[in-house]
């Protein structure tokens, strides 16, 4: 189907099922353009992902349609998807990594920002949860800054919350959350937070190999080239067309190793869930 014109929606839907060594541009464009036809299929896919994730995990390691569904819903900014995302977030990091391995590092902050529609409580809850994985906490922090950049989170509201994080809501021990908080505040020129940023370095909360005191303070006055996708998802095709998973050799050279890792992680997860 790679180079043919696709009309039947079931044919298009099948095209998005698995990674096949190329980017399914035409199929994805058809889905994006034919919302009425594909919405029920996308909604069902997300429902399975959130409510019955084991059904996704039992599919082959190249299965990707649940990720396409998540990304398309994010571009549509579909409000009905947000409760499912909240439920999905309740899975542990290991579970999420198995479910969304290719999308987590690439687009999860944008997905969260695009779908939350101002419902910040779940984001803040994860940011402040010391037991949550640092990666997810950073994702939620990045999502707040995307909302700010999109002018859907007022500057003062963001500053007030970040000050609360610095003074009372975050644990006073070094970690990725502090690293990214400092970086994001500096890059976005939140000068109101500069005293707290300096104190972060004084209290050794920031890994200086990630960002040094000098680098952070310099960023407050430097025009930083914005990350092109640090925004809502508005052009999904352009955003993901270069992802490594779509490269021709992505399923050849590393397929065996990836499959072995996937199966090992899945077995570990099953063993954990079977513990009394």
Image (cartoon, helix red, strand yellow):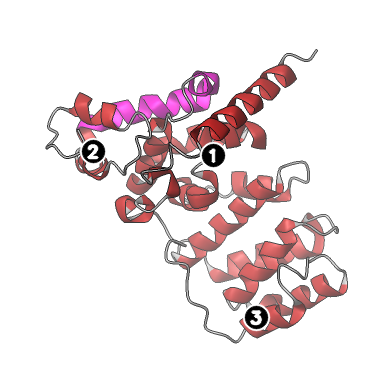
Give the CA separation, mark 3 to mark 2.
45 Å
Query: According to the image, label 2 marks what residue?
Result: 27
Q: Secondary structure at mark 1?
A: loop
Q: Position of residue 195 (x, y in %)?
A: 77, 79
Give whichever of 10, 197 is nearer the camera: 10
Query: According to the image, label 3 marks what residue?
Result: 191
Position of residue 70 relative to residue 188, above or below, is above
Quadrant occupied by the N terminus:
top left
* Marked residue nearer the N-terminal end (3 or 2): 2
Give the CA separation, mark 2 to mark 1.
22 Å
Tell me where the magenta segment starts and ends, as one range.
Answer: 37-58
Quadrant occupied by the C terminus:
top right
Position of residue 3 relative to residue 186, above or below, is above
**Tag of residue 168:** none
State which quadrant residue 172 falls in.
Answer: bottom right
Query: According to the image, label 1 marks what residue?
Result: 101
- The answer to whether the residues at label 2 and label 1 have Cβ atoms under 8 Å apart is no
Q: Secondary structure at mark 3?
A: helix
Give whichever of 109, 61 is nearer the camera: 61
* Marked residue nearer the N-terminal end (2 or 1): 2
């Amino acid at each position: 189907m790679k180079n043919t014109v696709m009309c039947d929606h079931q044919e298009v839907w099948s095209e998005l099922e698995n990674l096949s060594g190329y980017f399914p541009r035409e199929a994805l464009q058809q889905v994006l353009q034919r919302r009425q036809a594909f919405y029920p299929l996308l909604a069902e896919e997300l429902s399975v992902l959130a409510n019955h994730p084991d059904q996704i995990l039992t599919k082959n390691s190249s299965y990707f349609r649940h990720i396409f569904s998540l990304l398309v819903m994010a571009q549509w900014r579909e409000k009905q998807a947000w409760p499912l995302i909240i439920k999905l977030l309740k899975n542990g990091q290991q579970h999420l990594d198995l479910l969304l391995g290719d999308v987590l590092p690439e687009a999860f902050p944008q997905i969260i920002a695009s779908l939350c529609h101002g419902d910040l409580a779940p984001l803040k809850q994860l940011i402040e949860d010391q037991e949550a994985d640092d990666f997810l906490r950073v994702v939620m922090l990045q999502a707040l800054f995307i909302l700010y950049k999109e002018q859907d989170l007022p500057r003062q509201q963001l500053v007030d919350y970040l000050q609360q994080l610095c003074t009372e809501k975050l644990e006073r021990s070094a970690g990725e959350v502090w690293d990214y908080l400092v970086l994001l505040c500096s890059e976005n020129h939140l000068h109101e937070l500069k005293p707290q940023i300096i104190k972060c370095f004084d209290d050794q909360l920031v890994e200086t190999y990630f960002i040094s005191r000098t680098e952070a303070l310099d960023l407050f006055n430097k025009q930083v080239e914005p990350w092109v996708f640090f925004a809502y998802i508005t052009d999904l095709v352009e955003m993901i067309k270069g992802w490594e998973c779509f490269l021709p050799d992505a399923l050849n050279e590393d397929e065996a190793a990836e499959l072995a890792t996937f199966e090992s992680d899945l077995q570990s997860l099953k063993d954990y869930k079977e513990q009394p």
